Image (cartoon, rainbow, N blue to C red):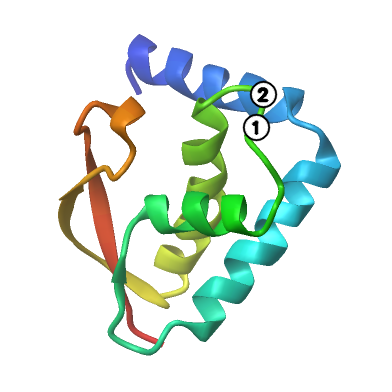
């Protein structure tokens, strides 16, 4: 692992540790429910979880990097368990993301 990767992961841990536990728990409930209700074959990226959380009323996190860090907490285990597969790359929906590209996933189970 490179130094850049180490700094990235340390930053992710720092930003997650600073977010209130009740916000993170609410995010997980909303987004897990969204995933369970997705039909098999649905293609999605982390943006759908951000939008669902906002619609769910939890508000913005203290730092924008929390969105990606939280999505990765869901997506990583789902990949490992074979519930989803990597599918492609999509543009971000948010204007703040400056058309950044994000990986997309397909629900298998």
Q: Quarter of the image holding residue 82?
A: bottom left
Give the residue at x 71% y 64%. Answer: 29
Q: Quadrant of residue 41?
A: bottom left
Residue 26 image offset from top left, x and y in percent:
75, 55
Q: Residue at x 81, y 33 (%)?
A: 20
Name the image quarter holding the N terminus.
top left
Q: Nearer the viewer, residue 82 or 91?
A: 91
Instruction: Name the residue tied to disc 2.
Output: 62
Q: Position of residue 2 (x, y in %)?
A: 32, 16
Helix, strand or loop status at disc 1: loop
Element type at mark 2: loop
Residue 62, horizontal then vertical, whole percent: 67, 24
Q: CA distance from mark 1 to mark 2?
A: 4 Å
Report whether 87 appears left or right of 17: left
Name the quarter where the C terminus is drawn.
Answer: bottom left
Q: Which residue is mark 1?
A: 61
Mark number displayed over residue 30: none
Identify the residue shown where x is 39% and y is 50%. Answer: 47
Q: Position of residue 4 (x, y in %)?
A: 35, 13
- How many numbered badges does the structure rendering display? 2
Crowdedness near tag 1: few (<14), some (14–19) or many (≥20) residues, C-alpha within 10 Å: some
Whether tag 1 and tag 2 are in contact, CB under 8 A, the answer is: yes
* 53 with respect to 25 (left or right): left
The local crowd at label 2, few if under 14, some if 14 to 19, many if 20 or more residues have their Cα within 10 Å, is few
Q: Is residue 52 left or right of residue 14?
A: left
Q: Please, is residue 38 above or below residue 79 in the view?
A: below
Q: Nearer the viewer, residue 17 or 56?
A: 56
The residue drawn where x is 29% and y is 45% is 93
């Amino acid at each position: 692992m490179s130094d850049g990767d180490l700094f990235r992961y340390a930053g992710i841990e720092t930003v997650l540790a600073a977010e209130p536990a009740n916000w993170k728990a609410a995010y997980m409930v909303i987004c897990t429910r969204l995933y369970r209700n997705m039909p098999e074959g649905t293609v999605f990226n982390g943006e759908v979880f951000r939008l669902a959380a906002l619609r769910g009323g939890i508000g913005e996190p203290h730092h924008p990097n929390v969105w990606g860090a939280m999505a990765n907490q869901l997506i990583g285990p789902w990949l490992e368990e074979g519930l989803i597969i990597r599918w492609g790359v999509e543009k971000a929906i948010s204007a703040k993301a400056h058309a950044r590209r994000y990986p997309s996933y397909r629900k298998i189970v």
